[in-house]
Amino acid sequence: MSIWSNRPTYEKITRDVIDSISDDLLAWAIYDHIWLKVGQDYPRTYQILATLPPGFSVVFHIFTLDGEIGNGGFNQYFFNGLDNYAEQQLAALELIEAIQHKCIFQQAFKIHDDEKQNQELQRRYEERTIEAFFSTYETTELGECDEAWYALDQELDSLLIRFIRTYPELFII
């Protein structure tokens, strides 16, 4: 655990820095660099992200997507409105060649679109309370997508690491 709590952050990302970081910490180093730049200026996260080389956006969208699904599944993803960034997330999945993840992501959108006809589920979404949120799990069919996503386990991490190692120029500041 101490390796995670004591992992270094990098003021500047260079080819040498990328080459020096072990695979298990590489994507995290890129993600941490984003938050080093953002600091406490959360409302400007996307503006700050736009000032960084394009690879940072890929890492950010993959981490955000996977983190939300890992924490509460696709139901939480939609409930929290992360689908507002679906286009960027889909592009990030395509860039790292996460074909299976992309298919699951698209299936989740189809289910979510179909569920827009479910008035009770939509009422709960609109209610925006913690109780309403938890009750949506009883109604949604998104659980099958969650299980498929979770079954891929560490594949997304491996694909992201391969992407960073293959295209370091997309991260060099």
Image (tube, grey):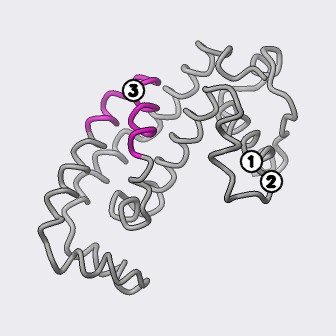
Mark 2, other Cα within 10 Å: few <14 / some 14–19 / many ≥20: few
Q: Give the residue drawn at x 30%, y 32%.
A: 100
Query: Which picture quadrant has residue 171?
Result: top right
Is mark 2 in CB contact (under 8 Å) with mark 1? yes
Give the residue at mark 3: 94
Could you say which disc has been placed on residue 35 in the image?
1
Mark 3, other Cα within 10 Å: few <14 / some 14–19 / many ≥20: some
Mark 1, other Cα within 10 Å: few <14 / some 14–19 / many ≥20: some
In this view of the protein, which residue sits in the foreground, 151 or 115? 115
Q: Amino acid at mark 2?
A: Gly
Is mark 2 in CB contact (under 8 Å) with mark 3? no
Residue 94 on the magenta span: yes
Identify the element where label 1 is drawn. helix
Give the residue at mark 2: 39
Tell me the magenta residue range: 86-103
Number of callouts: 3
